[in-house]
Amino acid sequence: MIDSSRNTFFSMVSPVFNEENTIRELVDRIIKSFHDSGLLFNKRWEFLLVDDGSSDQSFEVILQLMRKYPGLVKGIRHKRNYGQGQALKTGFYCAEGSIIGMIDSDLEKLPEDTPKLLKEFLDKDCDIVCSFIKNKNLVSKIGNRVCQFLFKHKVKQVGANQMIVHSRFVRRVNFVGNDQRYFLPIAVSLGATKIGEVLTTYKLRKYNKSNYNIYIKMIQGLPEMLLLKRRIKQKFYSIPVCEEYSKRFEIILSERIYS
């Protein structure tokens, strides 16, 4: 477990699976955008990259980034592929920051938008700030309406995957399945009340093929949401993940980056 007693202000978490072509650019752009914004000036922060059992050179690139940004970029490696949701869960579990940001590593979301979300979070003293994009496809729009109805939320995009949240709503929370699509209703069930939204930019990925399938998502969506509602009603997310979870991953120690 990473020591959480060092007063870290902010943790950025990104799940990585076979993204050797994008993570270097992602990290460079995120760090530059925060530097230019001045939001994290004189504050301790970290960027956690969670390698979810990649079969390409992603892990080696993470080691290179740890050398380039010692003490800032930190690597965590799953012992096998568990899926995006579990990679985020691991990142949250290990994060030191009192505020946590998340972004996918495929560059479909603009890294430069992340400081905008953090600024909204800080300026309005939010519990969680969600991103939303314009021109979502019809299936996503329908899914969002159903989610709004089931969980009584008015946000423009419930299933955002680029957001800022107070750590108490995600750290040690036992996310399962595709819960990464539903951080907002889970956070609200745990007490989040101040919700912000920021318009962000979406771009088609330059590398690899997305695993996103609109038809599978359409079929899975309603059962997932009904199960989520049931788990929330049973207060499932109030039970913290146990220490046994740490057996799934290894934290990359600083000595490792020079070996």
Image: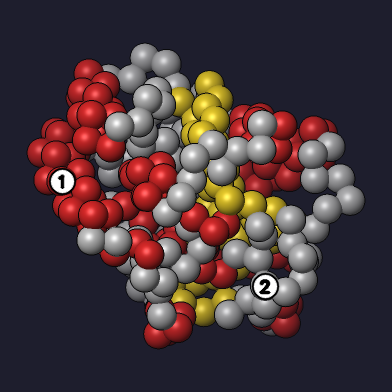
Q: Nearer the viewer, residue 236 or 203?
A: 236
User: Which quarter of the rendering shows the C terminus?
Assistant: bottom right
Say whether residue 58 is left or right of residue 82: right
Say whether residue 144 is left or right of residue 133: left
Q: Residue at x 69, y 53 (%)?
A: 10
Q: Is residue 231 visible?
A: yes
- Image quadrant in which you'd find residue 112: top right
Mark 1 or 2 closer to N-term? 2
Residue 134 image point, x, y percent: 42, 16
Q: Is residue 87 above or below residue 116?
A: below
- Image quadrant in which you'd find residue 37: top right
Say whether residue 156 is left or right of residue 101: left
Amino acid type indicated by mark 2: Ser
Q: Which residue is mark 2?
A: 4
Amino acid type indicated by mark 1: Leu
Say whether residue 61 is left or right of residue 146: right
Q: Residue at x 20, y 44 (%)?
A: 225
Residue 91 image point, x, y percent: 52, 63
Q: Nearer the viewer, residue 123 or 46?
A: 123
Secondary structure under the numbered disc 2 in the rendered image: loop
Q: Is residue 163 visible?
A: no
Task: Work out how far the residue at label 1 is from the one at label 2, CA to CA, in angstroms.
Answer: 35 Å
Secondary structure under the numbered disc 1 in the rendered image: helix
Residue 254 image point, x, y percent: 72, 77
Residue neighbourhood size for the residue with mark 2, other residues' Cα within 10 Å, grouped as few (<14), some (14–19), many (≥20): few
Q: Is residue 17 above or below residue 208?
A: below
Q: Which residue is mark 1?
A: 226
